[in-house]
Image: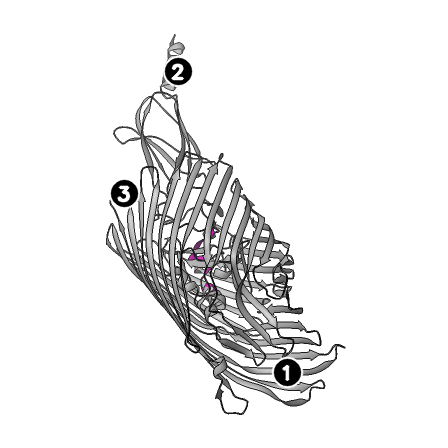
Amino acid sequence: MRRLILTFLVFVSISTFSQTIVGTVKDATENIAFADVIIKNSTNKIIVGATTDDNGKFSVKVKEGTYTILISFLGYESWSKELIVSKNLNLGTITLNEDAETLDEVVVKTKKRVIQRKVDRLVFNVEKSIVASTGNGVDILKVSPRVQVQNGAIEIIGKGASRIMINGRISPLRGEELIDFLSGLGANEIKSIEVITNPPAKYEAAGNGGLINIVLKKGAQNSWKNTTNLTYNQNKYNYASLRNSFFLNENKISLTASINVTKGSFLNFENLQIAYPSNFWNMEVDNKSKKDNVSGRFLIDYEVSKTFTLGVQYLGNFGQPDYVPTTTSSIYNSNNQLEKKLVNKGNFDINNINNSFNFHGIKKFENSKKNISFDIDYFEYVSDKKRDFITETFDGNNSFIGINSAGLNLSTQEIKNISSKIDVEYPLNKVNLSFGVKASFVSSTSNALFFNTITGVPVLDKNISNEFKYNENNYAGYISGNTKLNDKLELQFGLRIENTITEGMNLTINQINNNNYTKLFPTLYISYSKDDFNNFNFSYGKRISRPSFGNLNPFRVYVSDNSYSEGNPFLKPSFTDSFELTYSYKRNLISSIFFNSTNEGRGTVFTSNEVNQTQIVTRQNYYNQYNYGFTESFSYNKISWWESQNDITFIGYKTTFTKEVGSQPKNGFGVRVSSNNTFLLSENTKLQVNSWYHSKVSTGLYSVGRMYNLSFGLQHNFKKSNIKMSIFANDILNTASLNNYESIVNGIKQTYFNNPSSRSIQLGISYDFGNRKVKENKRNFGNEDEKNRAQ
């Protein structure tokens, strides 16, 4: 009897706790492991607790009654709900929203996925990746998914040249200046890389190649941090970079300050081969290029109240990328015998200065996610260039004949831009709505003077000297919305309208070109999650690519007496419609199919004149193009000591010429493969092996030869002293540079090669102290497009 009573009591006890509550916890893109699940009773006492498993699932048992369930995870807003438990409950999928105020304020031992797919972008979590835990901003871009960095150009594969954003603002720098700036960013300062193939409506519609947003970190609340990096790079010449970053976040003030200094030189070798009907030219440029650059950033935000913040940012860049080129043109007759040589020597002195000021504020509304922000921006860019040269002639036996020509080219470009914008986030019951307006005003002035100096006395040549002014006003507005139609289907849509008014004035010949156009730019994103492992995304966007201010200027820049480049004031913007369908399996395997259609395509045209044998570079709108392809990305991190990121892209081109350019279009198909691997040799030592291959491909006027790269890196972390040391061997086979860049115009074949010291050895040391805890700092600025077009 006693045993029967005991058995009955145990049964009653179990039955009163037999109600089970289950569910799945996730964020916008993936399930969250190790989230805390707490059940409280009516007196706020904790009854039971649990954590989610690797798939974000949880299960807790309670007896019948009324409870409050609380789910929390570091970096996300807590979720709670009152429950009346009378039977087993399945709460389905519970989505946590990221909390920008607490994200990453303490060290997290769990590992976030290296690559995340969001509804409108691909996010590469740099701080969570072993592959990108060292190096600088350029190194990180080289291992980012869908991104290619080559010969000073940064692009999203399949999209073309892309715009770079720093914390949501377009960088004003381009080419080597941009590369120098990104080289000054330490990897430990970067939180994530966002690859946005079809940017949302809130961003400027300019830029057919999409956006690459570099999200930086800043100090956590009530903390400070300082990081110093020194890097030495050895090629034929050498240069060194010193950078320092300081973060302070104390009470109501948040401050960020950084300075980057680079000093030294590198070898930039170029080769151009021209096959004229009567002879053959082989032009070799041995160019010692300086990397003298100083850049800095200062940002301060002040929390006026819990709902209102004001801030000011300054970004400056001062560069002297002078170079001393020696161009040797060897001219061979039809029997391949050397007829003569032209040796062009000179100096190219350059002074570039740009200053950017931003004043911003954001007003949040209490007990609501509604907010309104404003930005006022001012940007100025000044570039002074001085190019003097002398060309000497030698016969086939290398005997001096005489001076062929001598000249002095002076040019100045000054760009000023002021803009303002207002953005509003206004979430409704079922739709997160946002809208805004922007106005931008640009003025550009360019002067070019060419002096003939062959007599020793400079004589102004008015025929190839000019003064050009350009004004552009742009007015824009947008509306965007995001909604979850159900637990599986998410929709985001947007529409942007832009009105552009331009005036170009060639004061030398008293010529004025006016343009006024209004365009609509729609965007659409659809995300469907079939289950925890299978996700589908579709995106569409229309973009515009406006010509840079420098390309609109018709003045000529002479490289030598028989080679020059000139702009075109009649250039028109080009428009691209982009479609992309993406499938993600377990978020480690991402497959994408893309298609882009470009009208009024614009580019450079390299032509040679057979009669006087000159080489001329012009800019024209001359083509329409379709490009299409398939890309596959795979991340592997199942082994604790090995992490691998792999991409393969197949891309095809179909081009038609809309005007006569002296050639027929080239259409082709190419493939690019990359693999980036990091091996953990010990707790503090890592080996990095990166490689990529780019096949030969033809498109439009040009074809380019195959290229491939193999690089090694070794890093050791001295944890007790907070010092990191690294050594990298870049492009050890010296095969990663542009080669066989070929075009045939008017029957004359031109082949170009370029190697800007691709093979080099890099040594680095980094030291940091202070509070290591970080959180993300995102800002959006108003004059993004205008800065990007500055040259």
Which of discs 1 and 2 lies nearer the camera? The answer is 1
Q: Which residue is mark 3?
A: 368
Q: Quadrant of the N terminus?
A: top left
Residue farthest to the left, as pictured: 305
| Type of amino acid under label 3 | Ser
Q: In the image, is residue 443 above or below residue 433?
A: below
Residue displayed at 67% across by 79% down: 330
Which numbered disc, 2 or 3, marks the residue that appears first in the sequence? 2
Region in magenta: 182-196
State the image coordinates of residue 780 (x, y, percent, origin top left).
36, 56
Model colouring:
one colour
Compute the Cα span from label 1 to label 2. 102 Å
Which numbered disc, 1 or 2, marks the residue that appears first in the sequence? 2
Q: Which mark is residue 11?
A: 2
Q: Secondary structure at mark 3?
A: loop
Q: In the image, is residue 681 above or below residue 404?
A: above
State the image coordinates of residue 788 (x, y, percent, origin top left).
43, 63
Q: Which residue is mark 1?
A: 342
State the image coordinates of residue 615 (x, y, percent, origin top left).
60, 74
Compute the Cα span from label 3 to label 1. 72 Å
Along the line of sight, the residue nearer the viewer: 293 or 539: 539
| Type of amino acid under label 1 | Leu
Indicate the quadrant where residue 314 lies.
bottom left
State the image coordinates of residue 184 (x, y, percent, origin top left).
45, 65
